[in-house]
Image (cartoon, rainbow, N blue to C red):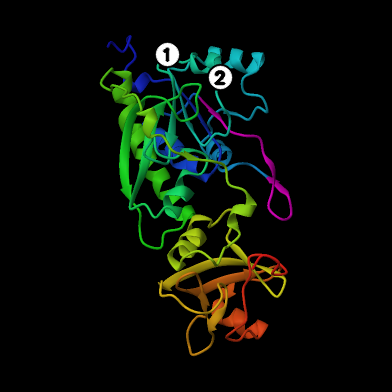
């Protein structure tokens, strides 16, 4: 396949991304001499408790580098598509941009629209692949660069990197690590793609699995799960939506735990088994015990589990519950 007279250095790239995950690829493109002709990101929106309006991380990086920045509310309207045609991109590269592409946009660049997805497709198509890998206890995950098609995360694969999960790694930590690896993968593959040295491989759709969007409710801890699964939930939902439980009607974020064992115990799930004794409190799972290392009660600073129990005067036999008033245990 000929590159049509377009060398790697002449690649016209439009980059689209929004959160922190999408920043490393933008940085690497610039460092590799492939600065985008335009950067697209979502408009600034209110975030956090104070609902402060702040520019998305990709927008901040683009402005810092003096790159042309677009933040349209509607990407695939007539006016924006006309502007994209004027930009005449060879390819559009996306990473967690936040919009589904329709046929007319997918067909616009000569090399197609490409996406960086933090899983080994076809495993975990969808919006929460990192969290699902941790929840399932996978030993290996990865990053995939693929050519986009109308069906979400179903396009032909251009390249993949396998990435072992690290012990105790949270979703936030793994996401940023995959972002760095994906950035390296993109700058390695794009010039080869432009010169016709990359062949896309169709996904095995029969092996596809899905990782749907998370909600705040997903973070509700169920102490009736085995201790190891409770620990994976806490890591998978850090930083969002955040694992939580209730203590005497107060919602408490559970920031860090460690599965101690999975031995059967007679205590009901969520029962404080041990407090004090110079270590973190132990809480019963089903089966097993979980050491609660760090928590954050509503309107309070994060603190160690031992300090929390001391401040709340918790004793062995008290319970942490999935619901505020213990209606469901």
Question: Label 2 neighbourhood size at 10 Å, few (<14), some (14-19), many (20+)?
Answer: few
Q: Which residues are magenta?
A: 38-53
Cα gap from disc 2 to disc 1, whole angstroms: 16 Å
Circle number at residue 200: none
Where residue 328 sits in the image (x, y, percent)? 67, 65
Numbered marks: total: 2
Q: Nearer the viewer, residue 311 or 25?
A: 311
From the viewer's side, name the closer residue of 149 and 49. Answer: 149
Place of residue 210 in the rendered image (x, y in percent of width and height, measured from the top left): 47, 39
Which residue in the rendered view is the most extreme toward the bottom?
Answer: 277
Identify the residue position indicated by label 2 in the image.
Answer: 102
Q: Is residue 1 above or below residue 277?
A: above
**Above or below for 17 versus 233:** above
Residue at 38% x, 30% y: name it.
206
Question: Which quarter shows the N terminus?
Answer: top left
Residue holding disc 1: 110
Is residue 48 on the magenta stretch? yes
In this rendering, the label closer to the viewer, 2 or 1: 2
């Amino acid at each position: 396949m000929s590159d049509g007279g377009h060398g790697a250095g002449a690649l016209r790239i439009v980059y689209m991304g929004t959160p922190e995950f999408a920043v490393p690829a933008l940085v690497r493109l610039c460092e590799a001499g492939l600065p985008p002709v335009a950067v697209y990101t979502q408009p600034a929106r209110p975030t956090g408790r104070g609902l402060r309006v702040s520019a998305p991380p990709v927008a901040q990086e683009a402005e810092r580098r003096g790159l042309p920045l677009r933040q349209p509310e509607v990407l695939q309207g007539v006016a924006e598509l006309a502007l994209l045609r004027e930009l005449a991109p060879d390819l559009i590269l996306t990473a967690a941009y936040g919009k589904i592409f329709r046929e007319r946009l997918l067909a616009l660049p000569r090399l197609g629209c490409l996406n960086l997805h933090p899983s080994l497709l076809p495993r975990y198509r969808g919006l929460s692949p990192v969290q699902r890998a941790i929840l399932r206890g996978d030993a290996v995950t990865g990053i995939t660069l693929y050519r986009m098609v109308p069906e979400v995360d179903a396009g032909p694969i251009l390249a993949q990197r396998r990435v072992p999960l690290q012990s105790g790694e949270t979703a936030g930590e793994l996401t940023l690590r995959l972002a760095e690896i994906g950035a390296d993968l993109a700058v390695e593959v794009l010039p080869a793609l432009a010169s016709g040295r990359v062949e896309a491989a169709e996904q095995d759709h029969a092996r596809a699995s899905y990782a749907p969007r998370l909600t705040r409710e997903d973070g509700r801890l169920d102490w009736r799960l085995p201790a190891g699964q409770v620990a994976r939930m806490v890591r998978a939902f850090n930083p969002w939506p955040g694992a939580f439980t209730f203590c005497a009607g107060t919602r408490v974020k559970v920031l860090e735990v460690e599965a101690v064992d999975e031995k059967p115990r007679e205590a009901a799930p969520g029962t404080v088994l041990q407090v004090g004794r110079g270590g973190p409190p132990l809480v019963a799972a089903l089966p097993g015990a979980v050491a609660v290392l760090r928590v954050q009660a509503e309107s309070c600073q994060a603190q160690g589990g031992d300090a929390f129990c001391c401040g709340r005067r918790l004793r062995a036999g008290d319970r942490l519950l999935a619901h505020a008033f213990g209606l469901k245990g």
